[in-house]
Structure formats: C-alpha cells, structure tokens
Image (cartoon, coloured by chain):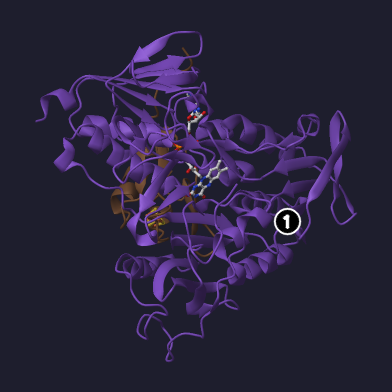
C-alpha cells in the first residue's frame, strides 16, 4: 500500500505521528515527513492515523498497477 | 443523469497527479464510458514533492512514491507513450508511433519539466542533474549517498533550497547560487527572503547571491563551475534548479492557446483556442494550465502547486460530465508548502500580487510568524513559518477581500501589527529560478510578465 499526505491541508497536529511513528514523523516544529511505501504490518496503523487526522489529509490506497505497454 | 455526457470516450493526456485525480473524479461523477490515460513516463502516477525531501534525505527510495488511488478508475493506462499532437477537428490525440486515439472530450494534464542547463555539452557532464522525475531523484540520491566533496545548487527557489537543506542535513558541503538578492525572493518577497538567506547561512550553506554560474567545468565528469563574480566553485555534483518549462510543445499545431506560461483556459477549465475562443471538449488541469482568478484581477495564474493540480483536476472532471448550467468554476486559492532547514513554510493566495507586507503574528527572530501581503489596501496572500494552524484564518481574509493591513484582533499583538513595509517583489527576470506562482496578465503599476 501507498500513502500520501495532502500537506497543503496538514496542520501539523501530529496525531499520525503518535499512531504510526514508523511511517510519519515530524521534522522540526511542524513539518511532516513520511514514508510513502507502507509495509503490510503498518497498514492498520496508517488506516487508524488516516481516520484520526483532524483535517483528513492522509490517503491510503493501492497504486495504479501495470507498467509501460 | 446527463446521458451522453456520462458516456462516450474520454482521453486524459498526462499520467501524473492531475491525470490520476481527474480519472478518479470522472468515475466518482458517474462517467461510465471509456477512459484512457496516456503518459510518456513508463511509471504509473507517482508523487513528486517527496523527491526533493524524503528521497534526498534517504528516508524513502525514489521508486516508492507511487500515488495511492482513492478508488480504481478502471482506466486503460497507456504508459511510456507520448502524445505528439491534438487534432481538435477530427477529435483525436495523436500518439508517438503514428497511432491516434479518438475522443469526445480530452483533458490535458501534461504538467511541466525541469528547465535544463542552457549549454547541452555542459549539461551532459557526469554529475550534473535536474530534479523533476523519479529517475532524476534516484540518480541524485545515489550521488549524495556516495558522499561528494561539495554539491553546487544553481537557483535559490523552493526546489533548490530544499535540495540544499537535504544536503546539509546529510552533512554535505553545499554552495547555492542565486542571481536575485536572496533565496525564495521571487515567491515570498524581500522580508521573508532575508530570513531564508539567514537560515541557509546558519545551516552552513555557502550562499552566493547576486551571482550567476557562467560555465560548468569538467572533462566528462563535472568538477566545478565559474561564477559571474569571477570566483570558482569546486564541486563534484551539480543540481540545476532553474525552474520549470510547460509541456505544451506537442500542442503547437493544435490551434489552442498554448505558450511558455501554459495552456490558457476559462474558470471552468475549458481550453481557449489561440483566437481566445473557448472550446467545449478540451479541458486543462494542473501545472500546464493557466487560468483566470477573480481575486487577483482575473489575471491568468500559472501555478506549480500540488494542491492546485488536485483541486483543478476535480473541477475539470466535474465539468467534463456536467451540462453548462451545472458546471463549477475553479476558484480555489493557491496554496503551497515547503519544508526546508527544519522550517515549515506555507503560503495561501498570491504573495507576488502585493505592494506591502506586515508581520501579523510572531516574529522573524522567533523563526515563527505569519506574514500578511496586501495589494492596494486589501489582503491578497499570507505566508506562515511554523504557524500552519493560523493560515486558515488569513485564507478567510483573502477570500473576503478584507482590508490591508488586517485590523487589530486579526493579530496576536496589542498594537495593530507592525508598520507595513514594501513587499519588494522583484521583477522575475532578475532571478535564477522560475517563480512557482506567476501572474501573467496586466498589472498597471508593475511588470510581472515572465519570459
Ligand atoms: C522536486 C519537486 C518538489 C516539489 N515540491 C512541492 C511542494 O513542496 N509543494 C507543492 O505544492 N508542490 C511541489 N511540487 C510541485 C508538484 O509536484 C506539481 O505541482 C505536480 O506534480 C503537478 O502535477 P501535474 O499532474 O499537473 O503535472 P506533472 O506532475 O508534471 O505531470 C505531467 C505528466 O505528463 C507527462 N507528459 C508530458 N508531456 C506528455 C506528452 N506529450 N504525452 C504524454 N505524457 C506527457 C509528464 O511526463 C508527466 O508524467 C514539487 C515538484 C517537484 C518536481
Ligand atoms: S494527523 Fe493530519 S494534520 Fe496532523 S500531522 Fe498528521 S497529516 Fe498532518
């Protein structure tokens, strides 16, 4: 699974950092850095982070499959 | 539902952020017809902002930034296939190799590419990079891993500054050259650019402003550069961060209003022809578009903003499947973020559309502030540094064309903010980097048109 955070919306509330510290972390006071590729054992945590994010900035999903034709 | 609009053939050209979000939105809006997405990169849509942040910091590999889907749009993806032209009369997208795709409606989302170093022989030196694609980021990250002696970054815009920040965080020596008086000055104006310069120097960046690189040196391998002030920088990696070029060349014969600032469209994302006549079956979204905004004097805006690509793709998709009276305008305010040197910079509105600025909250000394921009007595933009939570408030002031300077109560001070000072937005032609927001219309008291 992949995750992307809409950082124009993110306000650095850091709920995601508490819920999935292996995926999300703060860089400085409020800059959010995250690992876009979510390992299987983190999916549930990221799902919880996405639900908890007060501005609904976190999206978790599959990437488009298939390569060059 | 609107029978013929939710059926038929839609082709999207450009398989990146805007293309993917538009494809999803078309399905969410009830489009059941055939949907084809053409993209010249061999990869499914991936996210670019992490390429200058997580990827260069070594937190994420370059090939890990694939964009998650909100829901599978059940599209046919033609990846690694370039569109070479558009025939609006026959309603066909022409493809590399001679094939063509028929459409009833087409969405153009071909974005931008990195502006290359102007001298092709120097640009081809081993160790010289630009940063736009997954391959660019993978190559650059690998060089940074190898521990170069010094990295030269040409251009002090957002991308150049983020690259310099990542290098310093990895303990690498870095030189940044910027033709303008300070980094980020083209996007944020004089006051905040001074803070950006201080931040760079405090973090150990060798910052050379008012200087241009005149020559890249090396014999096969990049070894350094000559500067306009006569000095020389020895370095083994060079990143050219001179801004972006709109991917519009493939539209040259299409009769559409496509030029260096993008493809012009109306507020409903419908492309204009070169005669200024609006089309009804060619739509545009994302970095390649140039669109009018009522809050900024209906000037055409060219943005290189992630949030705009998403918002505009959704409006374009809605309008592609909706009859005239149900169509929506794309009125979202430009918003942008950048993280560098441990600071989170966020912007809303158009900071370059300003004559004065005032620090409404916080201070430069605290490295935590909200700066409000005004033009002719009304609020047109706000930028926060490590104060993202207050941005929404200023967004509201912009949307309601509130008076500038903002009244007391709009600020956390006893006094009504500091005295406004000139915003000092330079003519973009003096900068190394292209601006990520450009007004491309007529401003009576200022030349803002960019070449
Ligand atoms: C390093 C980097 C850092 C960034 N950081 C930030 C940030 O911090 N904040 C922010 O707001 N924005 C940031 N951005 C900008 C953001 O990534 C863009 O606004 C966004 O990618 C725009 O999406 P798009 O789909 O419009 O265009 P693009 O992502 O440019 O995609 C266009 C696609 O169309 C393809 N294409 C072009 N021509 C053709 C053709 N003829 N036929 C077929 N396919 C074609 C291209 O190859 C590309 O895949 C950053 C960009 C970069 C490169
Ligand atoms: S929980 Fe949401 S708002 Fe808070 S840091 Fe994470 S993404 Fe940002």
As drawn, B20 above or below B370: above
Image location of residue B336, percent across then percent down: 46, 55
Mark 1 within 8 Å of ligand 1, using the beta carbon = no
Image location of residue A30, percent across then percent down: 48, 62
Q: Colour of chain A?
A: brown
Q: Which residue is mark 1?
A: B179
Name the residue nearer the viewer: B55 or B433. Answer: B433
Q: Quadrant of ligand 2?
A: bottom left
Crowding around mark 1 (Cα neighbors within 10 Å: few <14, some 14 to 19, many 20+) is: many
Q: How many marks?
A: 1
Relative horizontal placement of residue A51, taking residue B154 as reference (left or right): left
The chain holding disc 1 is B
Residue pictured at 75% horizontal, 54% vertical: B177
**Residue B11 occupies which quadrant of the picture?**
top left
As drawn, B164 above or below B126: below
Image location of residue B195, percent across then percent down: 63, 69
**Residue B242 occupies which quadrant of the picture?**
top right
Outermost residue toward the bottom? B414
Outermost residue toward the top? B98
């Amino acid at each position: 699974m992949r995750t992307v955070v809409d950082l124009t919306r993110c306000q650095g509330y850091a709920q995601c950092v508490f819920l999935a510290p292996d995926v999300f972390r703060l860089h400085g006071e409020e800059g959010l850095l995250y690992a876009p590729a979510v390992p299987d054992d983190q999916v549930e945590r990221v799902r919880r982070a996405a639900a908890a994010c007060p501005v609904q900035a976190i999206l978790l999903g599959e990437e488009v499959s298939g390569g060059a034709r | 539902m609107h029978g013929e609009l939710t059926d038929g053939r839609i082709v999207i050209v450009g398989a990146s952020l805007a293309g993917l979000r538009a494809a999803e939105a078309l399905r969410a809006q009830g489009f059941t017809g055939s949907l084809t997405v053409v993209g010249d990169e061999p990869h499914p849509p991936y996210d670019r902002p992490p390429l200058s942040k997580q990827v260069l910091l070594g937190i994420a590999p370059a090939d890990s930034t694939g964009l998650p889907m909100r829901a599978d749009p059940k599209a046919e993806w033609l990846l690694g296939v370039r569109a070479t032209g558009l025939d609006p009369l026959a309603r066909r997208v022409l493809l590399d190799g001679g094939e063509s795709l028929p459409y009833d409606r087409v969405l153009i989302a071909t974005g931008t590419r990195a502006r290359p170093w102007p001298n092709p022989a120097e640009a081809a030196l081993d160790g010289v990079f630009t940063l736009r694609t997954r391959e660019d980021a993978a190559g650059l990250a690998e060089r940074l891993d190898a521990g170069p002696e010094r990295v030269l970054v040409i251009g002090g815009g957002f991308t150049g500054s983020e690259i310099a920040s990542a290098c310093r965080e990895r303990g690498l020596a870095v030189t940044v050259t910027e033709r303008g008086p300070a980094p980020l000055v083209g996007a944020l104006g004089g006051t905040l650019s001074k803070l950006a310069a201080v931040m760079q120097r405090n973090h150990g960046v060798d910052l050379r402003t008012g200087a241009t690189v005149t020559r890249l040196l090396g014999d096969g391998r990049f070894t350094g550069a000559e500067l306009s002030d006569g000095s020389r920088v020895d370095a083994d990696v060079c990143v050219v961060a001179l801004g972006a070029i709109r991917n519009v060349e493939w539209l040259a014969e299409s009769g559409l209003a496509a030029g260096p600032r993008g493809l012009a469209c109306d507020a409903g994302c419908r492309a204009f022809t070169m005669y200024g006549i609006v089309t009804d079956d060619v739509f545009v979204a994302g970095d390649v578009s140039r669109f009018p905004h009522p809050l900024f004097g209906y000037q055409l805006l060219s943005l290189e903003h992630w949030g705009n690509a998403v918002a505009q793709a959704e409006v374009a998709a809605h309008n592609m499947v909706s009859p005239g009276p149900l169509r929506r305008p794309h009125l979202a305010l430009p918003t942008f973020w950048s993280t560098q040197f441990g600071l989170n910079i966020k912007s809303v509105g158009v900071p370059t559309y300003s004559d004065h600025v005032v620090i409404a909250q916080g201070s430069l000394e605290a490295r935590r502030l909200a700066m409000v921009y005004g033009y002719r007595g009304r609020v047109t933009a706000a930028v926060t540094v490590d104060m993202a939570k207050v941005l929404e408030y200023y967004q509201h002031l912009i949307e309601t064309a509130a008076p500038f300077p903002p009244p007391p109560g709009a600020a956390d001070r006893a006094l009504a903010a500091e005295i406004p000072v000139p915003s000092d937005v330079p003519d973009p032609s003096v900068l190394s980097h292209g601006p990520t927001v450009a007004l491309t219309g007529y401003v009576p008291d200022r030349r803002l048109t960019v070449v």
